[in-house]
Image (cartoon, rainbow, N blue to C red):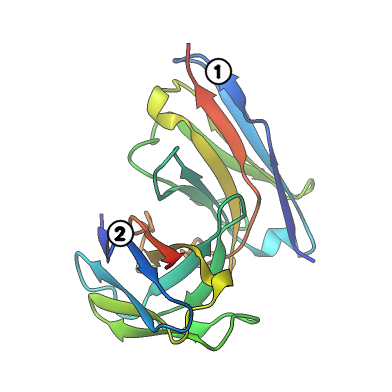
Amino acid sequence: DIQMTQSPSSLSASVGDRVTITCRASQTINKYLNWYQHKSGKAPKLLIQTTSRLQSGVPSRFSGSGSGTDFTLTVSSLQPEDVATYYCQHSYSDPPYTFGQGTKVEIK
Amino acid sequence: EVQLLESGGGLVQPGGSLRLSCAASGFTFSNYAMTWVRQAPGKGLEWVSAISGTGGSTYYADSVKGRFTMSRDNSKNTVYLQMSSLRGEDTAVYYCAKVLVLAVDGDLDYWGQGTLVTVSS
């Protein structure tokens, strides 16, 4: 099975800061990497599909990049409503489509 | 509007069984694969199982293979997760999620609110 490793596990940043979360796959997954946002008590939400495809309604301050084994989620200007845990997940080839361990984002 | 409503969670003893249901609405159910994802207390998301739109293909995580069975009834717009030989480590919130396409894939575009399963004596 493909393992997904995120870093950092948590971060605290100020409103307006640029925030970057990285995700590494244990083997190449081409561009088949998704990012989800999970707010406490809510259903997880698909933010970015296939590395960089922003889902409808997702603010443009969110962006994704990478290929192969290394990927990045960037929030260009952190907002209070972005407080959440973010997960990467691969969708390469066959299941299981494993998730990273998550990155908890807080406001400083 | 797409809606996914899970039910069937609760308290069960180790070794026991439970069946979760997920009722879907707002889309042509049989055209999409479905997935179950769980989150244990204080832990991250874990992909559990998936079923194709026709129900002809199912997949499981190694942690539940042989104990959990996923199925669907396209006439009722509902997917199920039959869980047996339950263990403490199965304690989690179980989410039902819609896949973007007919075949099983990892892209989960809509999720339910989840149902809590607690395995304890």
Give the camera-side residue of A17 and B108.
A17
- Left or right of B80, for residue B93: left
A77 left or right of A19?
right
Q: Nearer the viewer, residue B20 or A71?
A: A71
What residue is at 34 percent from the left and 37 percent from the top?
A: B63
Q: Chain of mark 2?
A: A
Q: Residue furthest left?
A: A26
Taking the spot 44% from the left edge, 87% from the top edge, the residue there is A76
Q: Which mark is residue B12?
A: 1
Q: Residues within 10 Å of mark 2 (few under 14, many from 20)?
A: some
Q: Which mark is residue A17?
A: none
Give the class, few, some or many, for how many residues have Cα within 10 Å of label 1's Cα (few <14, many ≥20).
Answer: some
**Looking at the image, is B32 positioned above or below residue B46?**
below
Q: Amino acid at mark 2?
A: Ser
- Pointer 1 indicates a residue of which chain? B
| Residue in the foreground of this view, choosing between A71 and A77 | A77
Q: Regarding mark 2 in the picture, which secondary structure is present there?
A: loop
What residue appears at the point 44 percent right and 31 percent down from the top-left corner?
Answer: B90
The residue that disc 2 covers is A9
Callout in the foreground (1, 2): 2
Tally of numbered tags: 2
Q: Position of residue B52 (x, y in %)?
A: 56, 56
Q: Position of residue A62 (x, y in %)?
A: 48, 83
Amino acid at pointer 1:
Val
Kindly state the secondary structure of the residue where label 1 is placed: strand
Residue B76 drawn above or below residue A58:
above
Query: Among all residues in the image, which is located at the extreme top?
Result: B121
Residue B81 location (% of width, % of height): 57, 37
- Asked if disc 1 and disc 2 are in contact, CB closer than 8 Å, the reply is no
Give the quadrant of the N terminus of chain B: bottom right
Q: Residue at x 35, y 85 (%)?
A: A65
